[in-house]
Image (cartoon, grey):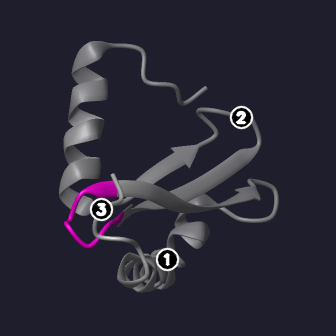
């Protein structure tokens, strides 16, 4: 089990996510699944949504799925361009 079980670990993980603008899931939420996610911001630079991909850990490791982060980031930037500036 990879679940974070104490406040200090969670705060450290959240700080890394904020800094890197990438979140990962290494079977914490669902056993046997890995995922990566990037934020989507609206044109006011406010958090709007996330873009993620998931895969069974038997088919792809967290390291392998992380190779898709640059494409997700590019797609996130493209999606930002089509948001309404008033979107929350």
Which residue matches tag 2?
30
Q: CA distance from mark 3 to mark 2?
A: 35 Å
Which residue matches tag 3?
86
- What residue sits 43% from the left and 76% below the top? 76
Q: CA distance from mark 1 to mark 2?
A: 21 Å
Quarter of the view holding residue 70: bottom left
Which residue matches tag 1?
72
Residue 53 picture location, percent across and down: 64, 63
Magenta span dominant secondary structure: loop
Give the mark, 1 or 3, whose residue is nearer the N terminus: 1
Label 3 secondary element: loop
Label 2 secondary element: loop
Mark 3: few/some/many CA within 10 Å (<14, 14-19, 20+) = few
Quarter of the view holding residue 10: top left
Q: Which region of the structure is painted magenta?
A: 41-47
Mark 2: few/some/many CA within 10 Å (<14, 14-19, 20+) = few
Disc number lying in front (1 or 2): 1
């Amino acid at each position: 089990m990879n679940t974070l079980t104490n406040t200090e670990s969670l705060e450290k993980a959240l700080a890394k996510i904020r800094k890197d603008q990438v979140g990962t899931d290494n079977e914490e939420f669902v056993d046997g699944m890995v995922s990566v996610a990037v934020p989507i911001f609206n044109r006011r630079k406010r958090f709007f949504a996330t873009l993620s991909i998931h895969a069974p850990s038997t088919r792809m490791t967290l390291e392998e799925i992380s190779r898709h982060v640059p494409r997700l980031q590019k797609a996130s930037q493209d999606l930002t361009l089509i948001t309404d500036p008033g979107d929350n």
